[in-house]
Amino acid sequence: MRKLMFIAGAAVGYVLGARAGRERYEQLREAARRFRKNPAVRNSMDSATLAGRQAAGRAAGAFADRAGERLPEPVVERLRSVQGRQTPMNDEWGSSR
């Protein structure tokens, strides 16, 4: 995660500090758009999103099971509902854009 943040920061710094101006910025922007539209990249992003959601659901269920007696009942029920919910990939957090 730190490498990704560093690379993103370096890219932003380059774009903001580049003397090449608007033309180079547009080239970089187009390259990023093509990268995001690549089917292999989109499949990887979708798979990572789905795996993250499934892991979050399992973690919420495990937390509800272990800390259930110490939490208010509405909180426990909400956590258990997150565990079993199947969310579509085209919601506001999905990657179908």
Image: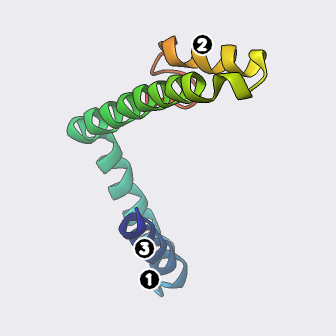
The residue sitting at the front extreme is: 69
Q: Are marks 2 and 3 in contact (CB under 8 Å)?
A: no
Looking at the image, is 38 positioned above or below residue 24? above
Residue 21 shows in this picture? no
Badge 1 or badge 3: first in the primary sequence: 3
Looking at the image, is 79 positioned above or below residue 3? above
Give the amino acid type for the residue marked by disc 3 in the picture: Phe
Query: Would residue 66 be found to the left or right of residue 58 on screen?
Result: right
Give the amino acid type for the residue marked by disc 1 in the picture: Ala
Q: Considering depth in this image, is 36 or 94 the residue closer to the camera? A: 94
Q: Are marks 1 and 2 in contact (CB under 8 Å)?
A: no
Mark 1, other Cα within 10 Å: few <14 / some 14–19 / many ≥20: few
The quarter of the displayed image where residue 20 is located: bottom left
Count of marks placed on residues: 3
Query: Would residue 24 be found to the left or right of residue 35 on screen?
Result: right
Q: Secondary structure at mark 3?
A: helix
Mark 3, other Cα within 10 Å: few <14 / some 14–19 / many ≥20: few
Badge 1 or badge 2: first in the primary sequence: 1
Query: Looking at the rendered structure, which numbered label has been put on residue 81?
Result: 2
Write down the residue under mark 1: 20
Q: Foreground mark, 1 or 2? A: 2
- The CA span between labels 1 and 3 is 22 Å
Q: Are marks 1 and 3 in contact (CB under 8 Å)?
A: no
Residue 55 location in percent, x, y? 41, 31
- The CA span between labels 2 and 3 is 36 Å
Write down the residue under mark 3: 6
Give the amino acid type for the residue marked by disc 2 in the picture: Ser
Looking at the image, is 2 positioned above or below residue 47? below
